[in-house]
Image: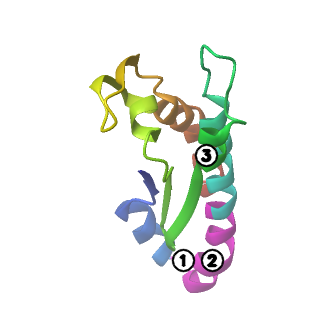
Amino acid sequence: MYTVELDNRSLKAISMFSGFSVLLTLEVQAAMAEGSTIIVQTVRDSMHWKNGTDGEGPLGQSIQSVIDSPSEIEVGSNLPYAARRDLGFVGADSLGRVYDDMGAFYMEQGLETAKPLVEGLLYA
């Protein structure tokens, strides 16, 4: 699971605005929701497999975001093999299947692609 969060410096700057609670509730929350959609899509777009499946397959569709608080979004998958596909895996799994998979690093690539887009929403 990866987390995107407004840093304390940003929250402090927001709190100095007159009426910041309205800004935090409405505008920032809209930006966080849009940002989470962007992150999920860029992670899915970063998935490229040898067998031709991609972000439209079961793993791609399992990538979800959860807005945990007014300043935090978590993005990840609940599938047990998601981390193995992302970070790589060498060895036998719990069923005895042997793997020698290099990591695809789709989460990192998707987050790097999304970063300037999401920052543009939050700091515009």
Residue type at mark 1 is Phe
Asked if marks 2 and 3 touch (Cβ < 8 Å), the reply is: no
Q: Nearer the viewer, residue 86 or 37?
A: 86
| Location of mark 3 (residue) | 39
Identify which amino acid the numbered label 2 is placed on: Leu
Range shown magenta:
17-32
Mark 2 or 3, which is nearer the eye? 3
Q: Is residue 28 magenta?
A: yes
- Spatial CA span between label 2 and label 3: 22 Å
Would you say residue 24 sits in the magenta stretch? yes
Which residue position holds label 2? Answer: 23
Whole-percent x, y for residue 86 in the image = 44, 31
Identify the main secondary structure in magenta: helix
Select label 1 or label 3 by which is in front.
3
Q: Residue at x 47, y 77 (%)?
A: 15
Q: Are marks 1 and 2 in contact (CB under 8 Å)?
A: yes
Q: Residues within 10 Å of mark 2 (few under 14, many from 20)?
A: some
Quadrant location of residue 91?
top left
The reply to whether residue 124 is visible in this rendering is no
Residue in the picture at 67% in, 34% down: 55
- Residue 3 sits above or below residue 14 on the image: above
**Circle 1 crowding by C-alpha within 10 Å: few under 14, some 14–19, many from 20:** few
Instruction: Classify 102 as above or below 15.
Output: above
Q: Earlier in the sequence, mark 1 or mark 3?
A: 1
Q: Secondary structure at mark 1?
A: loop
| Mark found first going from the N terminus, 1 or 2 | 1
Local secondary structure at mark 2: helix
The location of residue 20, given as percent across then percent down, is 56, 81
Label 1: which residue? 17
